[in-house]
């Protein structure tokens, strides 16, 4: 138990440093650079979900991939996106509910979504949710360590790939973040 807490703390510190560096790079006008390479979508989504599952063994994580599509993305950057979305979904899901990640091809795009059943994101927060240093009421992690850059970085990585992200959140349907990405990102 103590080892898992140490590992979790180290991972959180590493994410915070990486997010601050990315934020600085974007703010200085450099944008985020990506290096797209061929990637099997199904294997990629399962691998990232397995890593998040290891960090949260108490949660049920479901992966649904429609087919095994070949994409050209920056695997490290997209792992950052998926890890952030899944970690947030796990953190804010009601206890005893599952978190689902879905990946499917729609024409020449991939729809990558993460869903949880938890308290909805307040409507007044949603328009600025992907802005830096933004947190809504109740959106801090339990230890108060969130600095409000995660979703900003997610948005910037998706933009660098030519993609977008949106959120749908209601009490009845839960919260779903959906990223739309081209099959092939242009190198940054």
Image: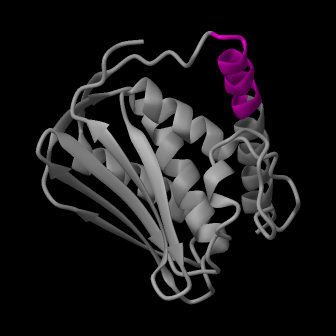
Q: Work out which quarter of the rendered image holds the C terminus and state it.
A: top left
- What's the residue at 80%, 62% (across, down)? 140
Give the main secondary structure of the magenta stretch. helix
Image spot of residue 159 (x, y percent): 45, 30
> Total of numbered circles in the picture?
0
Image spot of residue 141 (x, y percent): 79, 63
Image spot of residue 168 (x, y percent): 48, 67
Q: Quadrant of residue 120?
A: bottom right
Q: Is residue 72 left or right of residue 151?
A: left
Q: Is residue 22 magenta?
A: yes
State the extent of the magenta-drawn residues as a range. Answer: 18-29
- What's the residue at 57%, 72% (across, down)? 57
Q: Work out which quarter of the rendered image holds the N terminus and state it.
A: bottom right
Q: Is residue 22 left or right of residue 68?
A: right
- What's the residue at 35%, 13% (across, down)? 187
Q: Is residue 30 magenta?
A: no
């Amino acid at each position: 138990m103590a080892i898992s807490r140490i590992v979790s703390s180290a991972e959180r510190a590493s994410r915070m440093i990486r997010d601050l560096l990315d934020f600085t790079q974007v703010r200085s006008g450099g944008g985020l650079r990506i290096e797209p390479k061929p990637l099997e979508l199904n294997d990629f989504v399962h691998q990232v979900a397995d890593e998040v599952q290891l960090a949260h063994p108490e949660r049920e994580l479901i992966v649904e991939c429609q087919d095994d599509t070949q994409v050209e993305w920056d695997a490290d950057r997209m792992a950052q996106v998926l890890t952030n979305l899944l970690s947030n979904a796990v953190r804010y899901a009601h206890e005893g509910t599952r978190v689902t990640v879905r990946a499917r091809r729609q024409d020449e795009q991939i729809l990558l979504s993460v869903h949880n059943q938890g308290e909805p994101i307040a409507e007044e927060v949603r328009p600025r949710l992907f802005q830096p240093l933004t947190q809504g009421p109740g959106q801090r992690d339990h230890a108060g360590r969130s600095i409000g850059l995660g979703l900003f970085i997610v948005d910037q990585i998706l933009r660098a790939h030519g993609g977008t992200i949106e959120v749908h959140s209601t009490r009845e349907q839960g919260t779903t973040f959906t990223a739309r990405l081209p099959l092939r990102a242009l190198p940054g």
